[in-house]
């Protein structure tokens, strides 16, 4: 009846789809990825990888391969912030529009990195295959139907026209802003819609480096000639990327941007009318703010731009999508491995939809500031980038807490609060140095200290009686690891007798500031809630 059967079918082969395949593979789940393009991206899009994104790649075992793609040290470019000039030749007098905080050694074991999508997609595709995913380019989704047991998809080979029927337990739509998966589901979107139109111009201009006088920046806007043109330099090499805004309401269209006109736009923005410019590619796009009403419909999930789009201000797009992929992958893996309850998959929408809305709103705030449309009220809504990328909070049934704080809260607080990413603390064992973030991947982890013996012993007994993977880590004297700097309990907001339960994605599920009566029963109850099951507590009774 079916040509192929797979646990998970992924539609879309960009950073989000490929990351989904990598994360699933690292959790032991086989997948099939189909992408209508003939190969990985040839253009250096989405060139900024956030610290949290690098943490995820690190945890999945490909952090070194991704980091090796960095050309030189890209960190100073991020520190340069967002600039505005009349022409790039006047870079020394640039106005600093934004100077975001992005990482820090006390916050993460990783740091932001500049690298074009054309390079890191190659690594992702290779790792996806290595981890058990079949990556199939030049393949287009034609239709999907789902029932109580799975999803049936019809996939066409673009070159031959042959249509194959694929049966999957679950389907992930990571196929971009125009998602065919979202359309097939009939999922609507809400938001401001299109707020501007732009054209990405990829070009070579050897003289531009000299004009910029080694001034580091993430993005620099030139306003000369009446067209706002943004210049990005994060990917570390030619081609450069300039993105002028155009106005369809004035009759303008991408067809008006001939190579000759694009050369003129770049020269005008540079302030050097005779600069040598070679146009490599032109890609029109919309700066929109739209969030899908549902990220899950039955056995089908939306991730990345298929779920949420927003202006590129802040560089949240691909990164947020990769975070979607990670949140979804460990939950799908847990379900397919049989140890998670059905409710766990519902928490994907609960957690990532709220984050997607918050990201979209913050991108919109930045867009209005950069384009000169922001008053004091809009500016007051802006929170620092580091909060958006590392400090967001999850609220769902998989987080055991009575506190319900906003998704984004200033200032940055990573203090072990349930729903937040676990604090980064350097640990050491037998001369090996690692971060607390390195402890989390394929199981729940209960952190205790030397005085938390009751929690430690209860978790040890529970781990041997439940299918939910649970590992116990004692930090401190006589424990599994020693904290290099500072006290782990203080960092996680508990006493020396307390305990913290951390999910496979490094987010805190629950904590107890001190000891509690019947610790095994307490742990069984919170593990049931965090894993979406109803069996752990029953076993503990």
Image (tube, grey):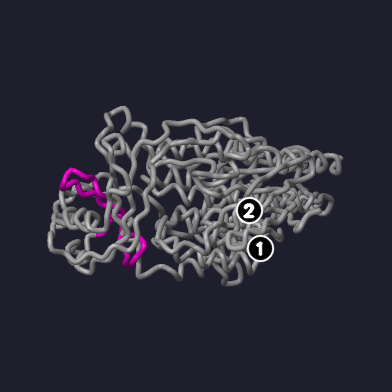
Q: Residue at x 49, y 44 (%)?
A: 177
The answer to whether residue 493 is above or below residue 333 is above
Q: Position of residue 539 (x, y in %)?
A: 86, 43
Q: Mark 2 vs mark 1: which is more N-terminal? A: 2
The answer to whether residue 451 is above or below residue 368 is below
Q: Say which of 341 and 202 sits in front.
A: 202
Q: Quadrant of residue 480?
A: bottom right
Q: Is residue 324 in view from this perspective?
A: yes
Q: Residue at x 73, y 51 (%)?
A: 168
Q: Say which of 262 and 483 sits in front.
A: 262
Q: Are marks 2 and 1 in contact (CB under 8 Å)?
A: yes
**Left or right of residue 94: residue 24:** right
Q: For residue 114: magenta?
A: no
Q: Say which of 303 and 480 sits in front.
A: 303
Q: Report the quarter where the C terminus lies.
A: top right
Q: Which residue is mark 1?
A: 133
Q: Which residue is mark 2?
A: 10
Q: Is residue 476 in view from this perspective?
A: no
The answer to whether residue 303 is above or below residue 365 is below
Q: Position of residue 303 (x, y in %)?
A: 57, 46
| Magenta extent | 216-240
Q: Residue at x 80, y 38 (%)?
A: 534
Q: Residue at x 76, y 58 (%)?
A: 3
Q: For residue 231: magenta?
A: yes
**Left or right of residue 339: residue 68:** left
* Mark 2 Cα-neighbour bin, 10 Å: few <14, some 14–19, many ≥20: many
């Amino acid at each position: 009846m079916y040509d192929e059967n797979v646990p998970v079918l992924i539609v879309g082969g960009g950073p989000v789809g490929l990351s989904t395949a990598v994360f699933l593979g690292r959790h032991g789940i086989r997948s099939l990825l189909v992408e209508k393009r003939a190969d990985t991206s040839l253009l250096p899009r989405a060139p900024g990888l956030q610290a949290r994104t690098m943490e995820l790649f690190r945890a999945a075992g490909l952090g070194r391969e991704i980091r090796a793609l960095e050309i030189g040290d890209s960190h100073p470019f991020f520190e340069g912030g967002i600039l505005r000039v009349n022409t790039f030749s006047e870079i020394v007098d640039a106005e600093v529009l934004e100077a975001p905080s992005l990482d820090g050694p006390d916050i993460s074991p990783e740091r932001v990195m500049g690298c074009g999508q054309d390079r890191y997609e190659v690594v992702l595709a290779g790792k996806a295959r290595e981890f058990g995913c079949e990556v199939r380019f030049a393949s287009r989704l034609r239709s999907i139907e789902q029932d109580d047991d799975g999803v049936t998809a019809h996939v066409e080979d673009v070159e031959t026209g042959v249509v194959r029927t694929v049966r999957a337990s679950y389907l992930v739509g990571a196929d971009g802003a125009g998602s065919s998966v979202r359309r097939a589901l009939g999922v609507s979107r809400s938001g401001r819609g299109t707020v501007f139109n732009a054209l990405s111009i990829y070009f070579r201009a050897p003289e531009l480096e000299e004009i910029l006088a080694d001034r580091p920046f993430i993005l620099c806007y030139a306003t000369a000639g009446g067209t706002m043109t943004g210049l990005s330099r994060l990917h570390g090499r030619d081609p450069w990327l300039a993105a002028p805004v155009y106005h369809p309401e004035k009759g303008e269209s991408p067809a008006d941007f001939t190579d000759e006109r694009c050369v003129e736009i770049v020269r005008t923005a540079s302030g050097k009318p005779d600069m040598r410019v070679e146009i490599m590619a032109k890609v029109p796009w919309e700066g929109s703010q739209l969030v899908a009403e549902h990220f899950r419909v039955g056995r089908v999930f939306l991730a990345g731009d298929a779920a949420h789009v927003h202006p590129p201000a802040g560089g949240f797009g691909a990164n947020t999508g990769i975070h979607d992929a990670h949140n979804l992958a460990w939950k799908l893996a847990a379900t397919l491995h049989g140890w998670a309850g059905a409710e766990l998959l519902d928490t994907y929408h609960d957690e990532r939809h709220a984050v997607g809305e918050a990201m979209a709103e913050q991108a919109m705030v930045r867009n209005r500031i950069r384009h000169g449309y922001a008053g004091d009220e809009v500016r007051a809504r802006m929170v620092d980038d580091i909060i958006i990328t590392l400090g967001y909070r999850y609220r769902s049934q998989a987080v055991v807490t009575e506190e319900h704080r906003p998704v984004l809260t200033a200032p940055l607080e990573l203090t072990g609060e349930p729903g937040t990413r676990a604090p980064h603390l350097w640990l050491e064992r037998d001369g090996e140095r690692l971060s607390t973030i390195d402890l989390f991947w394929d199981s729940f982890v209960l952190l205790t200290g030397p005085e938390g013996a009751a929690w430690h012993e209860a978790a040890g007994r529970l781990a041997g009686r439940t299918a939910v993977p649970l590992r116990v880590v004692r930090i401190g004297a006589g424990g599994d690891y020693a904290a290099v700097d500072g006290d782990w309990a203080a960092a996680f907001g508990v006493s020396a007798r307390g305990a913290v339960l951390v999910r496979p994605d490094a987010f805190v599920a629950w904590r107890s500031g001190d000891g509690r009566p019947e610790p095994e029963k307490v742990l069984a109850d919170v593990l049931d809630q965090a894993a979406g099951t109803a069996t752990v507590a029953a076993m503990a009774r």
